[in-house]
Image (cartoon, rainbow, N blue to C red):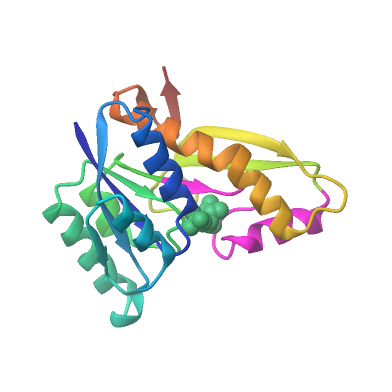
Amino acid sequence: MLNIAVLVSGGGTNLQALIDAQNRGEIKGGKITCVISSKPGVYALQRAEKNNIPSFVIPRSEYPDIASYTAAITEKLLQEKADLIVYAGFMTILDSQIVNAFPGRMMNVHPALIPSFCGKGFYGLHVHEAVLESGVKLTGATVHFVTEECDGGPIIMQKAVEVKNGDTPEILQKRVMEECEWKILPLSVSLFCQGRIKIDGNKTIVE
Ligand code: GAR
């Protein structure tokens, strides 16, 4: 069984999707063993507590820079013996220390079809605002491995949905979450835990 550590910063609906999948027996070969939040008091922490998953707060605001913050998160993950680290609405960009400590063992869910609408500044609702502003007719979500390049690592899975007339950023965010993120994130985690994702340069082979 691989130890899955989930990093969060907010509401934690993606964490909930992982917990629900685990409770249905759909995370094969892995178990969520800890949740780490970059912010105190967020609802994701209550979700962990309700499901008896150990949770820890390592507040970004208490560290002077990204290097010291990354070192603290990395140390905690090593202590917790994490085998897979999942960024599930984790809103801090960490530096190379963590990528070097867990190469090919960190994944992120992004609320758009990478390489569109991604990179620095594209997070949360801002992504959906930019999608609506651009006039594209399709959007979706991407699960990818985390590398030093923000939203730039090998793509594991993507799912698309239509942008509809009358969409607001909030309505579109809900559709992308429900129809894309909450499906492809648990599936990607389960495939990883079964050893069914191989990294080949900047691509993955999922079997
Ligand atoms: C999700 O839409 C996630 O994809 C996005 O933030 C939301 C968090 O929701 N993540 C990013 O934008 C990271 N670049 P949640 O806390 O309810 O899972």
Q: State the image quarter where residue 115 is shown.
A: top right
Please name whichever residue, 48 or 132, is drawn nearer the observer in this view of the structure: 48
Q: Position of residue 97 (x, y in %)?
A: 25, 58
Measuring 72% from the left and 59% from the top, which residue is drawn there? 169
Q: State the image quarter where residue 58 is shown.
A: bottom left
Measuring 21% from the left and 50% from the top, which residue is drawn there? 101
10 in relation to 163, above or below: below
Which region shows up in magenta?
108-135
Measuring 18% from the left and 60% from the top, which residue is drawn there? 76
146 in relation to 67, above or below: above
Measuring 36% from the left and 61% from the top, which residue is drawn there? 46
Q: Position of residue 31 (x, y in %)?
A: 25, 38
Which residue appears farthest toward the right when viewing the image?
A: 165
In this rendering, position of residue 130 left or right of residue 95 = right
Q: Position of residue 63 (x, y in %)?
A: 28, 79
For the C terminus, give its image quadrant.
top left
